[in-house]
Image: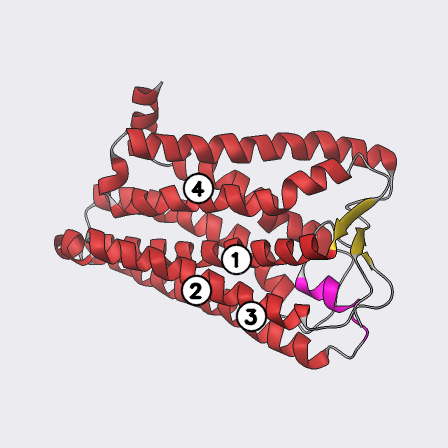
Amino acid sequence: INNVTEFIFWGLSQNPDVEKVCFVVFSFFYMVIVLGNFLIMLTVCTGNLFKSPMYFFLNFLSFVDICYSSVTAPKMIIDLLLRKKSISYVGCMLQLFGVHFFGCTEIFILTVMAYDRYVAICKPLHYMTIMDRERCNKLLLGTWVGGFLHSIIQVVLVVQLPFCGPNEIDHYFCDVHPVLKLACIDTYIVGVVVTANSGTIALGSFLILLISYTVILVSLRKQSAEGRRKALSTCGSHIAVVIIFFGPCTFMYMRPDTTFSEDKMVAVFYTIITPMLNPLIYTLRNAEVKNAMRKLW
């Protein structure tokens, strides 16, 4: 029996003064996310940087960042002004799908970007033959397909559960663990499958990224000082994004089906802070993008 037609969010805070401050802060953050990432996409497209695989992927990272934060941020910002923060059952399932689809796609794009840097630094002479347009397109398609499969599994697991009782979610968006807590049956097995699915992707990708960046840094010893400096500045920005994004993600999805009161603050990191920092981190450390932006202006 599924007689829950809507869910009620508790939101980020129950304190009206705190909510007003959050409204201003997160409205600003969301504006930065949309404008910053849109500016990167515009720069890559108009500055003809598309030919380089690195910017080809960066362009899509920006696109995914806008979509990813748009799944949760606008609703959360509007809810900060409302007494009753509700979402329909269908809306909740769509939000759950969107968060996992774009979040997982982002994880895969970051992994592909690490592979791209590895080829560029460790096999520079073969770089353009290995990372030709066809392979880039295949890798990109792979990130979307992977994200879609991951999120479909999550949604299918949740949709079949009966919800008959309390419909209050102690969160500001529909995520798997908080929603599982409201089901009327024992969700232990579903929780284990969800954790295995999300956890394997988060931790597996994180380990691949760590290994690839370690290999890159080790191989840099053979390069000239100038080459080393350039490579370090690109990789440094990638590593920063990876740590900010994967730290909170692993904390959230690598554990069994339990929820903590800190979860909301941790979730803010990967749904809002990372998409906001990506444009800053990738452009401030990158002369080519800066030059293209100057031309654009």
In the image, is residue 267 above or below residue 176? above
Q: CA distance from mark 2 to mark 4?
A: 18 Å
| Mark before the other along the chain sequence, 2 or 1 | 1
Q: Is residue 203 magenta?
A: no
Which residue is tagged 3?
A: 153
In the image, is residue 191 above or below residue 167? below
Q: Nearer the viewer, mark 2 or mark 4?
A: 2
Which residue is tagged 1?
A: 101
Q: Left or right: 179 with respect to 240? A: right
Asked if marks 3 and 4 touch (Cβ < 8 Å), the reply is no
| Mark before the other along the chain sequence, 4 or 1 | 4
Q: Position of residue 247 (x, y in %)?
A: 57, 58
| Mark before the other along the chain sequence, 2 or 4 | 4
Q: Is residue 287 visible?
A: no
Q: CA distance from mark 3 to mark 4?
A: 25 Å
Which residue is tagged 4?
A: 62
Type of amino acid at the residue the image marks with label 4: Ser
Type of amino acid at the residue the image marks with label 3: Ile
Q: Which mark is residue 146?
A: 2
Q: Is residue 267 visible?
A: yes
Q: Position of residue 198 (x, y in %)?
A: 56, 68
In terms of secondary structure, where does tag 1 sit? helix
Quadrant of the rendered image containing residue 287: top left
Asked if marks 4 and 1 touch (Cβ < 8 Å), the reply is no
| Mark before the other along the chain sequence, 3 or 4 | 4
Instruction: Read off the magenta span.
Output: 176-184
Type of amino acid at the residue the image marks with label 2: Gly
Q: Nearer the viewer, residue 120 or 20?
A: 20
In terms of secondary structure, where does tag 2 sit? helix
